[in-house]
Amino acid sequence: MTRPLPTPTQVSAGFWDAARRHELVVQRCDSCARLRHYPQPMCPWCRSTAFSWQPVCGRGTVYTFTVTHHRFHPHWADRTPFAVATIELDEGVRMVTEMPEGDVGNISIGAPVEVFFEDLGEITLPRFRLARG
């Protein structure tokens, strides 16, 4: 069974296009300069609809996480337990990721992480793993 994949929209297309190039970007409001993620059509702070895509470094820390022991989709039938983490990027934006299998037993709040990209044919997922070295 293949994993469920996100469906890019007009608002999120720039994020997914960058991921395909193995670049991590977030929205930057062109009016108030605040960074945001998930992609949204309107800035939640100033209500502007003008935005651009801002490259980010792809490094951060584990803000919080959970280790899941119950599969919610057949793709994870033989992959439990797995960890889902909220990552706080160095730029202050948070993203959610499924951690790689090898990181599940070593994850902790505050642990440094780095982005990597998983190419899945029609889409590339930016994911995070515990920082190497």
Image: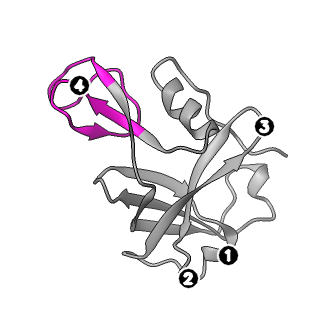
Left or right of 47? Residue 2 is right
Q: Residues within 10 Å of mark 1 (few under 14, many from 20)?
A: few
Left or right of 1? Residue 10 is left
- Distance of label 4 from label 1 (alpha carbons): 39 Å
Q: Earlier in the sequence, mark 4 or mark 1?
A: 4
The magenta stretch spans which residues? 26-51
Residue 73 in the image: state x and y as whole percent: 72, 49
Q: Amino acid at mark 3?
A: Gly
Q: Is residue 66 magenta?
A: no
Q: Residue at x 61, y 75 (%)?
A: 103
Q: In this figure, what is the number of numbered marks?
A: 4
Res 102 label: 1
Residue 39 in the image: state x and y as whole percent: 41, 31
Q: Main secondary structure of the magenta part?
A: loop
Q: Are marks 2 and 1 in contact (CB under 8 Å)?
A: yes
| Residue to which mark 3 is pinned | 121
| Residue to which mark 2 is pinned | 106
